[in-house]
Amino acid sequence: MKLHEQSLASLKAGLEQGDFSSRQLTQHFLERIRSLDPRLNSFITVTADAALAAADAADAARARGEAGPLCGLPLAHKDIFCTRGVRTSCGSRMLDNFTSPYDATVVARMAAAGAVMLGKTNMDEFAMGSSNETSYYGPVRNPWDQDRVPGGSSGGSAAAVAAGLAPAATGTDTGGSIRQPAALNGITGLKPTYGRVSRLGMVAFASSLDQAGPMARSAADCALLLEAMAGHDPGDSTSVDRPVDDCQTGLDRSLEGLTVGLPEEFFPQNLDPRIAEVTREAVRELEKQGARVVDISLPTMKYSVPAYYVIAPAEASSNLARFDGVRYGYRCEHPENLTDLYERSRSGGFGDEVQRRILVGTWALSHGYYDAYYLRAQRVRRLIRDDFARAFEKVDVIMGPTTPETAFPLGAKSGDPVNMYMADVFTIAVNLAGLPALSMPAGQLDGLPAGVQVIGNYFDEARILNVAHRYQQATDWHRRSPDTGGEA
Amino acid sequence: MNWEAVIGLEVHVQLNTRSKIFSGSSTAVGAEPNSQASLLDLGMPGTLPVLNREAVNKAVRLGLAIDARISRRCVFERKNYFYPDLPKGYQTSQLAEPIILGGEISLNLEDGSEKTVRLHHAHLEEDAGKSLHEDFHGMTGIDLNRAGTPLIEVVSEPDMHSAAEAVAFARKLHAIVTSLDICDGDMSQGSMRFDVNVSIRPRGEQTLGTRTETKNLNSFRFMEMAIHREIERQIEVVEGGGEVVQETRLFNGETGQARTMRIKEEADDYRYFPCPDLLPVVIEEADIEALRTDMPELPDARRERFAQQYGLSDYDAGLLSGERATAAYFEAVVAECGDAKQAANWINGELAARLNAGEIGIKDSPVNSASLARIIERVADGTISSKIAKQVFEACWQGEGSPDEVIESRGLKQMSDSGELERIVDQVIADNPDQVAGYRAADEKKQKKMFGFFVGQVMKQTGGKANPREVNRLLGEKLDG
């Protein structure tokens, strides 16, 4: 099998057996990026020289017998993670000229485990978007159909993995930004429990919802990556001080006795029946392996999108206040006074969607509206959490479609924000509750991948990875790759 | 009309933790601009706050000292506004659930009366940086060394009715926070800053008038001036048929003038909401008890102890017990010289006058406690007279050396040697035959009056160094004998 179609586990074995070096592997992916990415646009920055140097260091470490768990494995970081000495743009003109002076905890941990960074992937501006069309660096194209979106906001990471430009990538998920693009690109993506992975060094969008996670070709690869990313960070007060479960050894555990909940809210009347069928088919496979399926209900889930579009913009309006043209980032030319500096730097540095959310969030927090919007949204959030808590008294995992449809054409929704927001209708409730959830490829409609979501209880990442892995052992949707035409 | 002023204070007290409230940067003052600003203090993308628990402990100590309710759970919120020295675009502060609720502070006013001022609450927050408007050719420099320094903002009820009461409150709070060692009390460095809310109403009226807020006063004197001016201004406005406008004012201590900073109509909307990067702070009963058992002596208790233990007047005890540094200085002097009364006289008299004139804190006094004790001892053992002692103090203040060195080098030792003194007495008697004759002819009553003349002459001859008792004895012998 070609190097770029192999799982991390198999590349890791190849490195261990000396079939190839990290330098060779890294060169292979850099070459694929060079030939294919001008069209896909999945990377904002490619760090080729640093990648080769890191690969050589990894090869040397392996020769000394000091190979870490990710030693020599290339991967890409979403451009929302601060990377020391490398541009960290967050997909925005605002940070186009910003070089981070420090590494995010996620970046540092993966580097310490031996990973080789290929570059920084494209994304919706400040992670605000579901199609990657809000990026200052232009949209990413879906490798399955280049006239379609890859989803977002981690669309660059998802497209890069699907097209074999990187064996794995990091993403962040505030309302579905790992799972939705994973589904639209036919890869596996995991959003861990809120607090499982440090947020330090991740440019903040909505702090109470943001969570970093792995995106890769399989659940097993996600398990390997999660163990390197996760864990308590004293530098993030919301990171949880609790040991990281061993996610890898339990992957093969039998599903005998597993209870799967199917919430009726994931199968609304107007849902494309083919999308519903993809999930039902996946659930039938699990039943074959001994799982039991029960119908459940999450009655307040229908309020998740409106609650999210109050809370996330409210936090964003405050988190993005630091981008003021004073200390770093985009600054307008010849400001006449302070107000002019603020207005023109922020109007010029932020794109339309970011400005829209800042306005919405500012309004939701304003005197006279705070109780009606922000506080009410927080109450809805508690109700949603309670819904899930009740469900998890009866079931081990909850399943449903990741998205209501497959990848849509570029430009199809960019003029209609509310229609765009509905792309996350099945993913947002999980962020509001802070639960872990994974999306895995489970079918195709008209040649486009469709994803199924597996939601677990708090800190039950090992369980959902186990379920996804058992599914992937019995199916091959995750092994399918788009035709990229390249022969590298 | 007879007007009553109503005054409330908001006091920003800088907590003297070693590092900032949410980052590990040092809080020391005086460093190169931006050399004590971490990535968080600079507002870099992706940075996160981690609470310095010591700031919480110091706030709890204040709560215990003022008999307030200490919240078992308090919440940091973001106060959102744009300003160049506010690097994150919001100040992390507290609003709905502050760390301290209620409490009170008792004042001993100059007329001898007592008064209690209630507190509304006190909350923890981070300080902003500084905008430097000079030296940048029309541009503004930003120094973020101060950004993130922990503050506790103490908010009083509008219980004060004169500038004197407000200053007494401010001084008492200063005494409490320095006694607790939660603030260095250095006003010149902005360690305490006052916002003053003032309104007026006809005496006897219960409802409050429209108030103004004068911001950022950093000395007791400026505060007193600003309040006086503002009360006068409001009376003038109202008696002239106008209305007081709700506004924020700035007072310039150099010119004694205040001006409008902004009118409240452009109502500030800070869009407070709980900071999602910080968990609610939980304060356990056991933590509070541990801090309670470790409380230092507070000004009121110390005042009582000084009066009893050292037999000081209420007035002296009050002056010496207020500031921890003054109290410590006093007790050090007493420990060395054993004379509390003299120590009190010196510290409240000569020393206080010199310190005030030079705006120097007692910790930085050029005459330290050991030197002052030595001066008091040298008077007591007759080495110098109390009049010469003032000269010695002055020389020590000027840095001429220790008291003993000054006495030695300036030759200020009292002349107690009867041989030399006797010669001078004889000379004075010989030089003033008329006065001697007059004295001898006079009755006892008149003699008493005339005796002083001879003492004065001897003192003049000896440059004040003669031991007065010895002079009296010798003159008495020679004149009466």
Image (cartoon, rainbow, N blue to C red):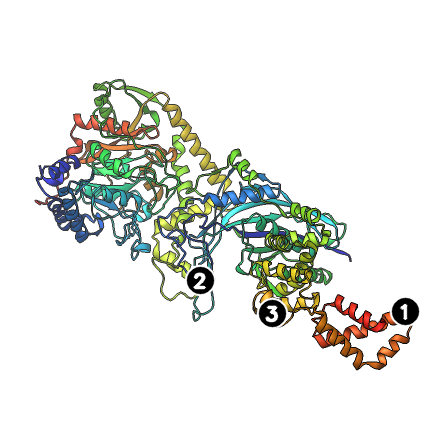
Q: Residues within 10 Å of mark 1 (few under 14, many from 20)?
A: few
Place of residue B343 in the rendered image (x, y in percent of width and height, measured from the top left): 66, 57
Q: Nearer the viewer, residue A16 or B428?
A: B428
Q: Nearer the viewer, residue A319 or A180?
A: A319
Q: Which of B405 and B19 is in front in this view?
A: B405
Q: Do the residues labelled 3 and 2 touch (CB within 8 Å)?
A: no
Picture residue at 35% right of the left edge, 53% below the top: A350
Q: Which amino acid does label 2 sit on?
A: Leu
Residue B106 visible to an observer of this rendering: no
Q: On screen, B8 above or below A304?
A: below
Which label number is shown at residue A454? none
Q: What residue type is labelled 3?
A: Glu
Report the Cα–Cα distance between label 1 and label 3.
Answer: 40 Å
Q: How crowded is mark 2: few (under 14 residues within 10 Å), some or many (20 or more)?
A: few
Place of residue A66 in the rendered image (x, y in percent of width and height, measured from the top left): 18, 41
Q: What residue type is labelled 1?
A: Glu
Q: On screen, A474 above or below A360?
A: above
Determine the chain carrying the residue at label 1.
B
Which label number is shown at residue A338? 2
Which label number is shown at residue B444? 1
Q: Do the residues labelled 1 and 3 touch (CB within 8 Å)?
A: no
Q: Residues within 10 Å of mark 3 (few under 14, many from 20)?
A: few
User: Residue A334 falls in which quadrant of the image?
Assistant: bottom left
Which label number is shown at residue B408? 3
